[in-house]
Structures are given as structure tokens and as C-alpha cells.
């Protein structure tokens, strides 16, 4: 059964090549016309985003802690903006061990303002939502480090 919403993968890499730039152009054009809703795929933003969730996107200035639609290399991802340096953002999925890297601000295509899961709406556009999201992401990273340390007391490298 096909979905009426475009699908955006927030997990494994998408196909490389010029597809990322073409998709960025299509999404940018659609967002200029107004808000856009996409269906999330993948697991890199769990537990916040689950496969099948509908994510409402708007074109607005990004802020630290926002979940944003970003172009990272040739991939289009829904990941969290962790830190800003100049005109670039440090990006990572909440469930990922490593950051995706720094992306130019013009590669931040839109900001997620809410998630629709079944009959429940999860707001993402308030200051407290952004701060809680960052705190959850850091807690999850600390828990992964702790589990790795228990398994390997000599060090938890790569977490």
C-alpha cells in the first residue's frame, strides 16, 4: 500500500550521487509553497521518531535542539541540530553513536514542528521540547557508554 506522504529515511544512508542534490531541490521547492508532511523511515532518531510517523516540516530559522531535515553529503536525513559554529550545524541522529558532521546552514532544509503517531501529536517547536530532546539524546549516549564500559572495563571506545 503506498503512502500519500513522501518518505524520508532517518537511518541508513540513501543512494549517493546527484540524487541528494535533486531531492534537496524538490523539497526546497515544495517547502517554499508551504509546510510539508513526510513519513519517517529508519531508526536513527528513536525513540522520538519511529518508522511510519508523519513529521510536519516548516521552513524557518533553525535553533539548537531542533529536529531538522538536512542534507548531509548526498543524503537527506531527519536528524537533530546539536551545535552551531558560524554558518554551520553539528548534526546527529538521537540513536546514533557518532555525529554526521558539520553541515552548512543552507543544507538545513526545514525544521520539524510536530510528529503525528497514530492519533497522538508530539510537539517539537517549543523551547522545552528542544531542550528535552537534547537531554534525552545525551542521556542515551551516556547509557550506551556505560553499557560498553561494563562489557569492556578497559575502555568504551567508539561509543
Image (spheres, rainbow, N blue to C red):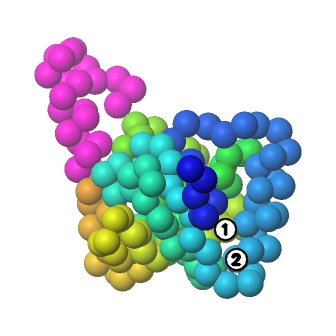
Q: Is residue 9 left or right of residue 129?
A: right
The residue singled out by tag 2 in the image is 31
Seen from the viewer's position, the closer of residues 73 and 29 is: 29
In the image, residue 33 sits, relative to residue 21, either above or below, namely: below
Q: Residue at x 76, y 37 (%)?
A: 16
- Nearest the viewer among 76 and 63 is 76
- Secondary structure category for the residue under label 2: helix
Alpha carbon distance from label 1 to label 2: 8 Å
Residue 116 % position (x, y) = 39, 69
Badge 1, how many Cα within 10 Å: few under 14, some, many 20+?
A: many
Residue 123 position by quadrant = bottom left
Check disc 1 and report its element: helix, strand or loop: strand
Q: Is residue 60 above or below residue 68?
A: below
- Tell which circle, 1 or 2, labels the residue nearer the N-terminal end: 2
Percent across and percent down for residue 143 are: 20, 39
- Main secondary structure found in the magenta portion: helix
Residue depicted at x 46% and y 76%:
113
The residue that disc 1 covers is: 109
Provide the residue span drawn in magenta: 139-159
Amino acid at each position: 500500500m503506498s503512502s500519500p506522504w513522501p518518505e524520508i529515511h532517518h537511518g541508513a544512508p540513501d543512494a549517493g550521487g546527484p540524487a541528494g542534490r535533486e531531492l534537496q531541490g524538490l523539497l526546497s521547492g515544495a517547502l517554499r509553497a508551504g509546510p510539508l508532511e513526510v513519513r519517517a523511515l529508519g531508526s536513527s532518531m528513536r525513540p522520538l521518531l519511529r518508522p511510519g510517523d508523519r513529521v510536519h516540516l516548516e521552513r524557518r530559522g533553525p535553533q539548537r535542539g531542533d529536529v531538522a531535515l538536512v542534507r548531509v553529503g548526498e543524503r537527506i536525513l531527519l536528524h537533530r541540530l546539536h551545535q552551531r559554529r558560524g554558518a554551520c550545524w553539528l548534526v546527529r541522529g538521537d540513536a546514533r553513536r557518532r555525529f554526521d558532521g558539520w553541515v552548512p546552514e543552507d543544507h538545513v532544509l526545514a525544521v520539524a514542528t510536530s510528529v503525528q503517531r497514530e492519533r497522538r501529536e508530539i510537539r517539537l517547536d517549543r523551547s522545552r521540547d528542544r531542550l528535552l530532546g537534547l537531554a534525552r539524546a545525551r542521556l542515551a549516549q551516556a547509557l550506551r557508554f556505560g553499557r560498553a564500559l561494563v562489557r569492556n572495563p578497559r575502555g568504551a571506545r567508539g561509543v
